[in-house]
Image (cartoon, grey):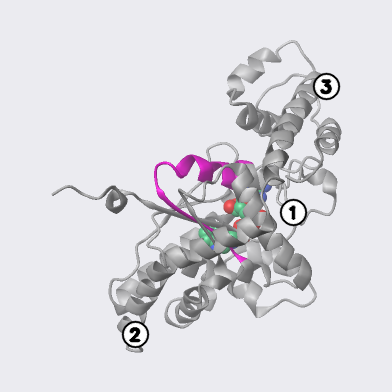
Amino acid sequence: MELDKQDIKKTVFSGVQPSGVLHLGNYLGALSQWVEMQNQYNCIFCVVDYHAITVKQEPKELSRRILDVVKIYLASGINPEQAVIFQQSDITAHTELSWILNCASARLADLNKMTQFKEKGAKKESVSVGLYDYPVLMAADILLYNTDIVPVGDDQVQHVELTRTLAERFNRDYGQVFKIPEASVRKQGARIMGLDDPSKKMSKSASSPANYIALTDSPEMAAKKIKRAVTDSGSEIKFDLKKKPAISNLLVIFSLLSGINISELETNYKNKGYGDLKNDLAEEVSKFLREFQIKYNSFTDEEVKRILKDGADKIRPVANETLRRVKEKLGIN
Ligand code: AMP
Ligand code: TRP
């Protein structure tokens, strides 16, 4: 019997929150991986709006950002004919499974280990319960679709590990339901560092916009940020994370955008200075953004809403079937 191709394809699931600007770190660490995977795998990409509301959002802005994140997916090269794109809150199974996992699998001791919560929570006076519980909702997202692979930047690896733990515990205690997923991180690019401080990751919650290049920054602004980026002592252009963290970060960004590998870049810049590297990288980044933004601006809100609706309608039965099996195991079906 011939196997249907769909049956043997692995499933990929990932998501981005519609909160704050998306930056080059998101693109190089996560989105560009998704694009590469869509030809080979069953891909599902979510806009995780329930994750975004773990911190206060301005409602009008949030509605806007949900559509903008989809435009970023599309401009990155995600093809809605190949991959499913949907909005988390359109499928109620996510919050339902999240509650069930809260009760049946997740322990305080698990969540207390999550470093992202420690970082995010520490900065705030009042912290929502949702922010603490956020990794359990992420586990529900992943487990509903029998996911094999979760392409993310390295800050999310701990959450995928937790997902595995929750799934294994449920399977052990109630019977086999969940597939155990694995994180996929880039060898290079899993952690793009801030342009103003190469010891911290590029982040939308950075205190200064000099830290990141937003995918919506004007090419001129982005070029300026590259030229003003912090560098290391010395003058040699060499990939060395310990001694030259800033130059190494610029080389990684350059390499991923241009497709030229790092050792080749080192050779090209052998007798040149930091200024030359920055000028050329500024040019490369501007070119990338110019092309990206033409695509970004070519999609209408109406198109995006249609894509989200079609995506949710297509994928909802899979989520509901997993939820049904979970409830059956618990005796609440
Ligand atoms: P977030 O913006 O936190 O919702 O992250 C969306 C995706 O981008 C996740 O897969 C993150 O791991 C990834 N990501 C965020 N910041 C970076 C970074 N500085 N370098 C690489 N990947 C990142
Ligand atoms: N927590 C992820 C982040 O902040 C976003 C996310 C939510 C996610 N659910 C997911 C990523 C499922 C991968 C798979 O970046």
Front-most of residues 298 and 41: 298
Mark 3 residue CB less than 8 A from any atom of ligand 1: no
First along the sequence among labels 2 and 1? 1
Residue 154 as seen in the image, left or right of residue 299: left
Question: Which image quarter holds the C terminus?
Answer: bottom left
Q: Residues within 10 Å of mark 2 (few under 14, many from 20)?
A: some
Residue 46 as seen in the image, left or right of residue 245: left
- Residue 279 lies in quadrant: top right
Residue segment shown in magenta: 28-48
The residue wearing badge 2 is: 330
Q: Position of residue 198 (x, y in %)?
A: 74, 40
Q: What is the C-alpha distance between the residues marked 2 and 1?
A: 40 Å
The answer to whether residue 9 is visible is: yes
Q: Element under label 3? A: helix
**Is the Cβ of the residue at disc 3 closer than 8 Å to that at disc 1?**
no
Magenta stretch encompasses residue 58: no
The kind of residue on which mark 3 rests is: Gly
The residue wearing badge 1 is: 21
Q: Which mark is residue 99?
A: none
The residue wearing badge 3 is: 275
